[in-house]
Image (tube, grey):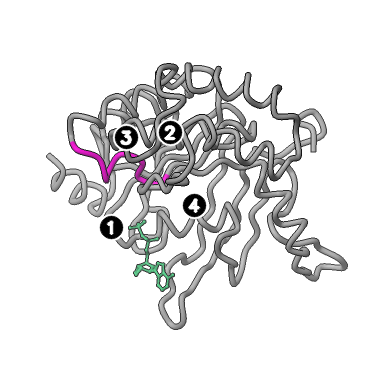
Amino acid sequence: MTSSARTMPLVHAVNVHKAFGRNEVLKGIDIDVDEGEVVCLLGPSGSGKTTFLRCINQLEDIQAGRIWVDGDLAGYTEKNGKLHRLKDKQVAAQRREIGMVFQRFNLFPHMTALENVMEAPVKVQGRKKAEVRAEALALLDTVGLSDKESAYPAQLSGGQQQRVAIARALAMKPKLMLFDEPTSALDPELVGEVLQVMRDLAAQGMTMIVVTHEMAFARDVADRVVFMDGGVVVEQGDPKTVINNPQHNRTKAFLSRLR
Ligand code: ADP
C-alpha cells in the first residue's frame, strides 16, 4: 500500500497477545510507529521485546490482536470480522517489506560480503545481477565496508559482520527495519561502529524499531522509547523524559540497574 493511501501509522499494533503454551508473553501490546520514526524498545530480559519484534515480522503467530504494517494486516486477511491466515507466499511477500537484524549476524559463511548482500535481491526478487551488484557495492560503502566486498564472514570482525548483515537487510529496500539487540553479541570496542551505521540510517529517515540496552543510543537517536515489562507497555515517551525522569517504579528499577 502506498503511504498516501494509508491513514494509520506505518506499524499499528493493537492488543497483541502472544503465548508460548501457558506462558503468556505479550499481554495486550499497543504500539504505533510512524513513518520515519525511530522507536527503541527497552525493558528487562524476558519482558517480551524480541517476541514482539518477531510478531511484527510474522516469525510468530499471535493469539489475539492485530498488527498492521503499512496498512496491511500482517499475516491475515479479514472477511466479515473473521481472520483468515494468508498463504505462505503472501506472508513471504509481506515479510520482504521488513528488514530484520538479529543479535547474531548469521551471514552465509560460504559467501563473500558482497554475495551475502546480493543474495536475496537476486534469488528472491529475481533481479538482474549487474544492477543488484551496483546497489550492493553502494550499500557496503554506506556501512563503511567498501574494501571488504570479497571477504568471507570468518575474515571479518563481529562488528563488520553485523554491518554486512545491515547492508543485506537494506538490499531488499525495506519500509521498516527491526533490530533485535544488534550489538549485544559484540565485543565492547566494536559496538560503536554498528551503532554509527544505525544512527546514519535513522538520520536518512528509515523507520526503525530497535530492541537495545544501549541507553545512550536510545537517548540520542530514538524519537520515542517504549518501556516494556512482563508483556505489557509500562510507559513510553520522549527518550530524555523517560530515561531521565521515569514515572513508573518498574522503569525506575530497570534504569537504576543499568547505571
Ligand atoms: P526479551 O526480548 O524482552 O528478553 P523475549 O521476547 O525474548 O523477551 O522472551 C519473553 C518470554 O518468552 C521469555 O519468558 C521466553 O522464555 C519466552 N519465549 C520466547 N521465545 C520462546 C519460544 N520460542 N518458545 C517458548 N518460550 C519462548
Q: Are marks 2 and 4 in contact (CB under 8 Å)?
A: no
Image quadrant of ligand 1?
A: bottom left
Above or below for 82 versus 251:
below
Q: Is residue 257 toward the left or the right of residue 193 in the image? A: left
Label 4 packing within 10 angstroms: few (<14), some (14-19), many (20+): many
**In the displayed structure, does residue 235 sit left or right of residue 123?**
left
Q: Residue furthest bottom?
A: 22
Residue shown at 51% from the left, 69% from the top: 18
Do callouts 1 and 4 mark residues in contact (Cβ within 8 Å)? no
**Does any atom of ligand 1 lie closer than 8 Å to the CB of label 1?**
yes
Query: Mark 3 or mark 1, which is nearer to you?
Result: 3
Q: Which residue is mark 2?
A: 224
Which residue, given by chain and number where applicable, does mark 4 sit on? 53
Q: Determine if the magenta segment contains residue 173.
A: no
Q: CA distance from mark 2 to mark 4?
A: 16 Å
In percent of the image, x 44 and y 74: which residue is there? 24
Amino acid under disc 3: Gln
Query: Would residue 184 be counted in the magenta stretch?
Result: yes
| Disc sitting over residue 165 in the figure | none
Instruction: Indicate the quadrant containing the C terminus: top left, top right, bottom left or bottom right.
Output: top left
- Residue 192 lies, with reference to residue 23, above or below; the image says above
In magenta, the rendered stretch is 180-187
Residue at the disc numbered 3? 155
Write down the residue under mark 1: 45
